[in-house]
Amino acid sequence: MIDEHLALERAIVDALNAALGASDRTSIAAFARKMGRPYDSTRNYLTLERRLPLDFLMEAATALGTTPEALVAEAREKHLQKRLEADS
């Protein structure tokens, strides 16, 4: 079950990075400044070097003009699609 949670967390981070890339190619440094967060911790979360805290997900979604629910829904859909492809 832990592997499943980590895979979903990776998918959520992928959704965050996709949204970040789609928002005028904002750099991680600029995104960290916009959120009022340190660059290093922001980079660590977005590169999966550290686990993604819920408060970061909520703040990041707001800063990107979306909701945590939308990001998680997108991540779940992509994650389930990968599982289906792997099972076939």
Image (cartoon, rainbow, N blue to C red):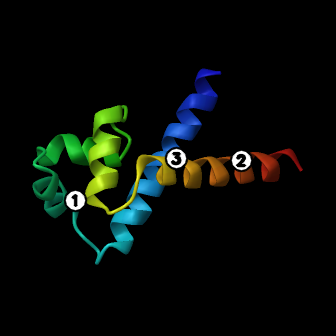
Residue assigned mark 1: 28
User: Percent position (x, y) of residue 80?
Assistant: 71, 47
Horizontal side of 46 relative to 36 (left or right) equals right
Residue assigned mark 3: 72
Residue nearer the viewer, 62 or 45: 62
Q: Are dots 3 and 1 in contact, CB under 8 Å? A: no
Residue assigned mark 2: 80
Q: Can you say which quadrant of the picture contains the N terminus?
A: top right
For label 3, the SS is helix
User: Percent position (x, y) of residue 3?
Assistant: 61, 27
Residue plotted at (33% across, 48% down): 46
Task: Look at the picture and state if 27 lies above or below 63.
Answer: below
**Circle on res. 76:** none
Tally the numbered discs.
Answer: 3
Task: Look at the picture and state if 17 lies above or below 50.
Answer: below
Mark whose residue sits in front, 2 or 1: 2
For label 1, the SS is helix
The residues bearing labels 3 and 1 have C-alpha atoms spaced at a distance of: 20 Å
User: Percent position (x, y) of residue 68?
Assistant: 42, 47
Q: Which amino acid type is shown beneath numbered disc 1?
A: Ile
Residue plotted at (53% across, 32% down): 6
Q: Along the polypeptide, which appears first: circle 2 or circle 1? A: 1
For label 2, the SS is helix
Q: Along the polypeptide, which appears first: circle 3 or circle 1? A: 1
Q: Which amino acid type is shown beneath numbered disc 3?
A: Val
Task: Look at the picture and state if 30 lies above or below 86.
Answer: below
Residue plotted at (57% across, 39% down): 8
Horizontal side of 83 relative to 14 (left or right) equals right
